[in-house]
Amino acid sequence: RSTLFPYTTLFRSWLTNVGINVVHWPENCNGNVGDEGRRRRMAWDTEGTKRRIMRAATTEFAQHGPDGTTVERIAGRAGVNKERVYNYFGGKRTLFATVLREELANVARAVPVTSFATEDIGEYAGRVYDYHRERPELIRLLRWEALVFDDEVPDEEVRRTYYVCKSDAVVKGQEAGMVTANFDAPHLMMLVLSMAGWWSTVPQVARMLCGPPSDEEHARRRAAVVSTKIGRASCRERV
């Protein structure tokens, strides 16, 4: 064993602390490790480190908001040095915007919609309910965003385009006679999203009104969301 072994061990510990994933590091430094693939090496897992930071930041921001946590806490939860957070994501507000952007992309992929002429608006609301029940982080992040930002929020112009696409799906349903024309499309989309997501926004109110969130209770809540008549066109409107 080389006399440098204690120093390589310390170096390996330091690399881990600053967010570098050490896959292998030779205990002897002469490079002579045999012919059977036992050569040890050191690798930097940048993408893995970023993913750990994002997961930690999502949890911290959802629980405490951007002003209720620190870069140090996020780094500690991710198991990296705080310099990794700054290097990869900049400051805390930039990281919050990145987390929210990723969560919005996740829900867009998980609950897509293009036209309520071909998809039932109630069933869409049910899928949104399911998503927020399983992943309440997005609702919490949006709630914190509303409390922290007084005016324009991060990526507002880009996100407005995302919501316009949802309104366009309503317009297509209205033109096909499948969705009520009693509301403007953006207003109706806001009502549908609120109806599906408010249960997860204020779970304490839902519990006081409807009882503990058992599986049976969730089924009743989802059925109420899906069966609501607020978005569907009436028979008179379809004539």
Image: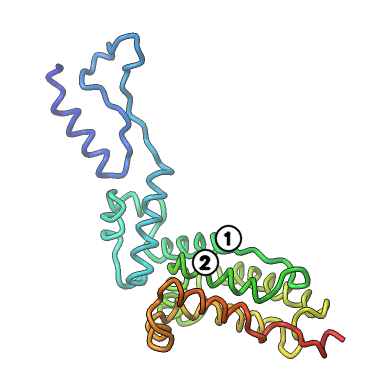
Residue 207 at what x, y percent from top left? 39, 83
Kind of residue indicated by mark 2: Tyr
Secondary element type, mark 1:
helix
- The quarter of the displayed image where residue 193 is located: bottom right
Towards the viewer: 235 or 132: 235
The N terminus, quarter of image: top left
Query: Which residue appears at 24% of the width and 14% of the height?
Result: 30
User: Mark 2 near mark 1, Cβ–Cβ under 8 Å?
Assistant: yes
Give, as a three-letter code, the residue at label 1: Ala
Q: Position of residue 9 (x, y in %)?
A: 18, 30
Instruction: Looking at this view, name the residue that lies furthest to the front.
Output: 216
Tell whether 42 sits left or right of 1: right
Q: Residue furthest right?
A: 239
| Residue drawn at (74%, 90%) of the image | 182
Residue under label 2: 131
The Cα atoms of the two marked residues, 2 and 1, are separated by: 8 Å
Which of the 4 image quadrants contains residue 21? top left
What residue is at 57 percent from the left and 72 percent from the top? 156
235 in relation to 170, above or below = below
Give the secondary structure at mark 2. Answer: helix
> Is tag 2's residue or tag 1's residue first in the polypeptide sequence?
1
What residue is shown with label 1? 110
- Are there few (<14), some (14-19), or many (20+) residues within 10 Å of tag 1? few
